[in-house]
Amino acid sequence: MLEKIKGTIGKYSMLRGRGETVVVGLSGGADSVALLHVLKALDIGQNLNAVYIDHGLRPAETPAEIAFCAGLCKSLDVPFMSKEIPPSPKIMSNAQDTLRDLRYEKDENIAYEQKAGRIALGHNKDDQAETVVLNFIRGSALTGLGGIPPCRGKIIRPLIEATRLEIEQYLESIGVNFITDPSNLKQTYTRNKVRLSLLPTLKAYNPNIVDTLCANAGILRDENTYMERQAIKKTMTLISRKAESKVELFLSPLQTLDKAIVRRVIRAAVSSVESLKGIGAAHIDDIITLVNNASSGASIRLPKGIRVIKGYSILTITTQQPVQINTYELDVPGEVVIKEAGLVIKASLVDTAQDTGNRQNIYLDGGMLNLPLTVRARQNGDFFYPLGFGRRKKVQDFFVDEKVPKDGRNGVPLVFSGSGLVWIAGMRGDERFKPKADTRTFVRLELLQMRT
């Protein structure tokens, strides 16, 4: 048994070196008791600390378990502590999954307090097989079918290649007792049903089902790791822009990738933005359908206020909501602050017009303007005579030609003189209002970002 566990520790590089502090999760059950004994017996230079986590769900049994663990640690000369997780409605409503997460969080905190490099947990080979079956039943992807990772961050699982029977036989051989948690025998929890009913049934078809499931899980973990690395590399080349509330991906190369890689690329991209985390597998498939089948400008809405917009060359995943420009009066000179779009339009009188080639400003013939100007969003039927084009064109058609996404068009300010469209701010002016040779009054309009 000791050689087997030592081999597992070496195979996965679980321990870093002599003098490293390791926190051992100790419940008093066979797995954790064997884990503590094995690590102590191997004596490979680690400083061991044991911790019992009290979930507050079994107050009748907890004092005896703590006393047992404290006595065990005293006999092994291992420092011991017990920590409580305050009970909450969340624990009661989803006990096993929630308790697992809270245990990990508490273990991480203790490891930080103890300056520990590793947290050793007692998951065994049977736990691995049960997890793979559970994740398959739940419809998990490749990550879930890979089961419990032998190492994850600070967490190590030295017993992951030992069966429950081997562990109990080891404890019997060294004359060490352990506590049996009575909740493990209740078929209230799905995991217990898998352990007590489903796996025994599967063994009738394959007596080595535990070995088979664990071997397959190892292969899937390796393949998943490789796929994840490839996807991350590809994601880095596809992200065009990233901010607190959105991520943008180059669309054309995304459309050429195999679906298996696209799923991972999208997952990696959204995971890189905190506000987008939580998009599930079904939502990712919806995004892929949008990418491959929808027309430019189409969009979908996902939970948590997330929107996905297929532009002409960019796929945008964002929590930002579409902007609808209000209506404003713009005096000359003067300015309007368009808070909803984070923009400012400033009007000023100048001595002459300059051809700067900057779309963020425009020069107009002041004698042609009816003041004050009006700033508003587009409306059905709006048209203008694009500067340099000369012929009448609908604003709708102009937006299509300029590849402005559908749900972004109401956020583009339009400046009017009376009923005449003077300027699509930041994009194109109107031929009718450009300065001429006999122009005496020049008006400059500037589009600026609002200062935060």
Image (cartoon, rainbow, N blue to C red):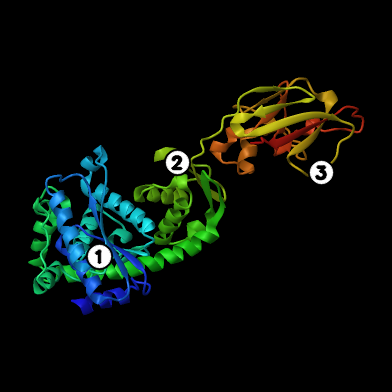
Quadrant that contains the C terminus: top right
Q: How many marks?
A: 3
Q: Is residue 345 above or below residue 247?
A: above
Q: Which residue is mark 3?
A: 356
Whole-angstrom CA distance, mark 2 to mark 1, is: 50 Å
Q: Position of residue 382 (x, y in %)?
A: 65, 28
Name the amino acid type tagged 3: Thr
Judge left or right: residue 64 versus residue 224. Answer: left
Which dot marks residue 10? none
Q: Is residue 188 above or below residue 35?
A: above
Q: Position of residue 347 (x, y in %)?
A: 77, 29
The residue sitting at 77% across, 20% down in the picture is 371
Name the amino acid type tagged 1: Val
Res. 146 visible in picture = no
Badge 2 or badge 1: first in the primary sequence: 1
Query: In this view of the protein, which residue sits in the foreground, 436 or 90?
Result: 90
Whole-angstrom CA distance, mark 3 to mark 1, is: 76 Å
Badge 3 or badge 2: first in the primary sequence: 2
In the image, which is nearer the foreground, mark 2 or mark 1?
A: 1
Crowding near pointer 2: few (<14 within 10 Å), some, many (20+)? some
Crowding near pointer 1: few (<14 within 10 Å), some, many (20+)? some
Q: Which residue is mark 1?
A: 78
Q: Which residue is mark 2?
A: 306
Secondary structure at badge 2 equals strand
Secondary structure at badge 3 equals loop
Secondary structure at badge 1 equals loop
